Amino acid sequence: MPSRLTVSRDLADLLKLLAHPDRLRLIEELRPGEKDVTGLAEALDLPATRVSQHLGQLRAQRLVEERRDGRSHFYRLKHPHLAAWILDALQFVDIRNRLQEAEAIDNARALWSDAAPNTSH
């Protein structure tokens, strides 16, 4: 059975791979099913070469699978629940944003309280 350290390192490597906005968008674009490189490039408004590079990295980690049909390369998620996992992570982004907004409101409130004019003349 792998040690917790080994598993933690493997998970950290996965998170590093996913820590690129283009790769996250690729995973989400592949959520409904298989797509070719050209379709992915158009959907994401990225050069096909960049899409291919990212797909190569995802394929090397066995997160996507490739199917060739003539000159076309089609990709699909090997584990479709990965896209759902990423969607689940959005709640943490939302929480972080709310916390940042709350802090900004508290800061503004403190600044406004300190800047209140002295009413006793």
Image (tube, helix red, strand yellow):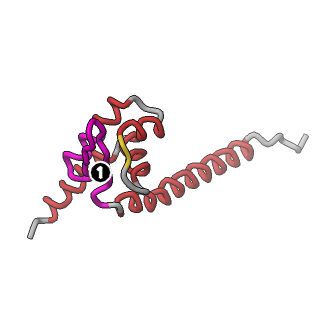
Q: Residue at x 26, y 53 (%)?
A: 63
Residue 118: x, y in percent? 83, 41
Residue 36: x, y in percent? 36, 42
The 10 Å Cα crowd at callout 1, few under 14, some 14 to 19, many 20 or more, is few
The residue most toward the front is: 70
Q: Is residue 55 placed above or below 94 in the rendered structure? A: above
In the rendered structure, does residue 114 fall within the stretch colored magenta? no
Q: Is 72 or 16 nearer to us in this picture?
A: 72
Q: Residue at x 88, y 44 (%)?
A: 119
Please, what secondary structure does the residue beneath circle 1 have? helix
Q: Residue at x 39, y 39 (%)?
A: 22
Residue 99: x, y in percent? 56, 54
Q: Residue at x 34, y 59 (%)?
A: 82
Q: Quadrant of the N terminus?
A: bottom left
Q: Quadrant of the C terminus?
A: top right
The residue most toward the right is: 121
In the rendered picture of this protein, how many numbered marks are placed on residues? 1
Range of residues picked out in magenta = 54-79
For this view, does 29 lie left or right of residue 54?
Answer: right
Q: Is 70 or 26 nearer to us in this picture?
A: 70
The residue most toward the bottom is: 1
Q: Is 4 or 81 nearer to us in this picture?
A: 81
Residue 44: x, y in percent? 46, 38
In the rendered structure, does residue 57 fall within the stretch colored magenta? yes
Q: Amino acid at mark 1?
A: Leu
Name the residue carrying label 1. 15
